[in-house]
């Protein structure tokens, strides 16, 4: 069913864009076969590795598949819009406008160009984004404290060791106090990804590198991956917290497992356990891969929640659907009660749909500031 759903836009393109063109039957048939092959990218991924989430092809082929798949997706959306306009025109006196072949050529060219741009935006090493967060009762020792959020790296054939090495180099050059990774680090087994994740060993920050699992960790040998992350020098916050200190001042960093964890037989997402026995009165930063449970975190007194998962919605328009599936949260900062929720667009994204048109990837550096108290007369 999964592969059939992704094949439907391709069938629409074949019927409404390709077949009306004044081409020889043999040529149209060949192009139709190529389109069908491209539309089944996720099937070929599953056959290559046993999982749609881990295409084990050469990187150039993964990029080509994403470009072709993206062009089909965009072309289907364009043609649907044209068909709706044509249908509406039939209701207008003198309407029933024809759709000349030149329009089909133009929309196909535009779809291929936009898809190329979208893939390029998806696979680049992301630029830096600076965000200042004001926190009530932030201790003086943490005023100006900096932390870097990486999330949704999806290290894979599309985001290999060379890409990871560049992300690590840029991250270390920022000189932040703390680095956090909010899930979905990998797509693939430990055996296939070991070399690609190795550059993460070089991540450095004075207060350490801390991570939580995302939903993709549960697709691939969860226990083995958590052990390997620890061996790389990254501390796992799975339903627990740590206290960061500057002299007598304290800041709590807490992390939870993914909301999907219990479906894989792993410890369920447990915010109460993560915050148990946390120092009283210390501001809390929570790492939670998915943003949709943010209201509960706010009720528990969390000051700042850092999430990912949504990839920012990837494409303008599609982001509205992604928001609906994530409690209305999709990209950027939100005020949730007295808490700030930040939903990161992602350092990378799933190689099965590597397209970005609008929401950019980001290396996100946060600077914490004490919230000024309102003046009283």
Image: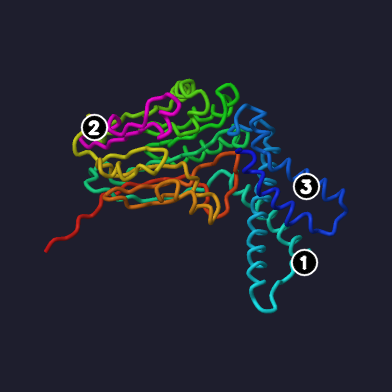
For the residues carrying marks 2 and 1, which lies nearer the camera in this image?
1
Distance from disc 2 to disc 1, alpha carbons, whole Å, reads: 67 Å
5 to the left or right of 360? right
Q: Which mark is residue 278?
A: 2
- Pointer 2 with pointer 3, Cβ within 8 A: no
Q: Which residues are magenta?
A: 247-276
Distance from disc 3 to disc 1, alpha carbons, whole Å, reads: 20 Å
Q: Which residue is mark 3?
A: 32
* Residue 259 counted in the magenta span: yes
341 to the left or right of 301? right
Q: Residues within 10 Å of mark 2 (few under 14, many from 20)?
A: some
Colour pattern of the rendering: rainbow
* Residue 20 counted in the magenta span: no
Mark 2 vs 1, N-terminal side: 1
Residue drawn 55% across and 52% down?
Answer: 315
Residue drawn 67% across and 36% down?
Answer: 59
Q: Nearer the viewer, residue 216 or 234?
A: 216
Residue drawn 64% across and 76% down?
Answer: 92
Q: Which residue is mark 1?
A: 100
Q: Nearer the viewer, residue 202 or 107?
A: 107
Quadrant where the C terminus is found in the figure: bottom left
Residue drawn 66% across and 49% down?
Answer: 9
Quadrant where the N terminus is found in the figure: top right
Mark 3 vs 1, N-terminal side: 3
Expressed as whole percent of the image width and height from the top left, the position of residue 199 reads 53, 30
């Amino acid at each position: 069913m999964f592969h059939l759903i992704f094949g439907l836009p391709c069938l629409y393109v074949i019927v409404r864009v390709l077949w009306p063109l004044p081409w020889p039957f043999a040529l149209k048939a060949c192009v139709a076969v190529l389109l069908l092959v491209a539309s089944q990218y996720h099937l070929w991924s599953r056959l290559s590795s046993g999982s749609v989430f881990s295409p084990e092809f050469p990187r150039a082929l993964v990029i080509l598949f994403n470009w072709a798949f993206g062009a089909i997706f965009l072309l289907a959306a364009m043609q649907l819009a044209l068909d709706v306009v044509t249908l509406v025109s039939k209701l207008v006196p003198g309407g029933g406008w024809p759709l000349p072949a030149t329009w089909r050529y133009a929309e196909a060219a535009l779809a291929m160009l936009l898809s190329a741009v979208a893939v390029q935006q998806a696979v680049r090493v992301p630029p830096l984004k600076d965000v200042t967060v004001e926190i009530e009762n932030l201790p003086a020792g943490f005023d100006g404290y900096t932390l870097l959020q990486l999330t949704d790296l999806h290290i894979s054939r599309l985001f290999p060791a060379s890409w990871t090495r560049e992300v690590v180099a840029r991250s270390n050059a920022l000189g932040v106090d703390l680095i956090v990774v909010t899930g979905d680090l990998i797509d693939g087994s430990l055996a296939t990804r070991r070399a690609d994740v190795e550059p993460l060993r070089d991540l450095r920050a004075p207060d350490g590198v801390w991570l939580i699992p995302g939903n993709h960790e549960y697709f691939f040998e969860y226990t083995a991956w958590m052990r390997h992350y620890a061996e790389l020098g990254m501390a796992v916050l799975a339903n627990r917290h740590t206290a960061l200190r500057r002299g007598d001042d304290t800041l709590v960093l807490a992390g939870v497992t993914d909301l999907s964890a219990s479906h894989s037989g792993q410890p369920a997402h447990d915010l109460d356990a993560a915050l148990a026995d946390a120092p009283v009165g210390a501001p809390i930063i929570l790492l939670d891969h998915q943003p949709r449970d943010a209201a509960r975190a706010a009720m528990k007194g969390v000051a700042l929640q850092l999430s990912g998962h949504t990839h920012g919605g990837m494409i303008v328009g599609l982001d509205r659907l992604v928001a609906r599936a994530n409690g209305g949260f999709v990209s950027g900062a939100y005020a949730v009660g007295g808490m700030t929720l930040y939903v990161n667009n992602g350092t990378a994204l799933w190689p099965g749909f590597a397209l970005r048109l609008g929401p950019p990837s980001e290396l996100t550096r946060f600077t914490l500031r004490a919230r000024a108290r309102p003046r009283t007369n």
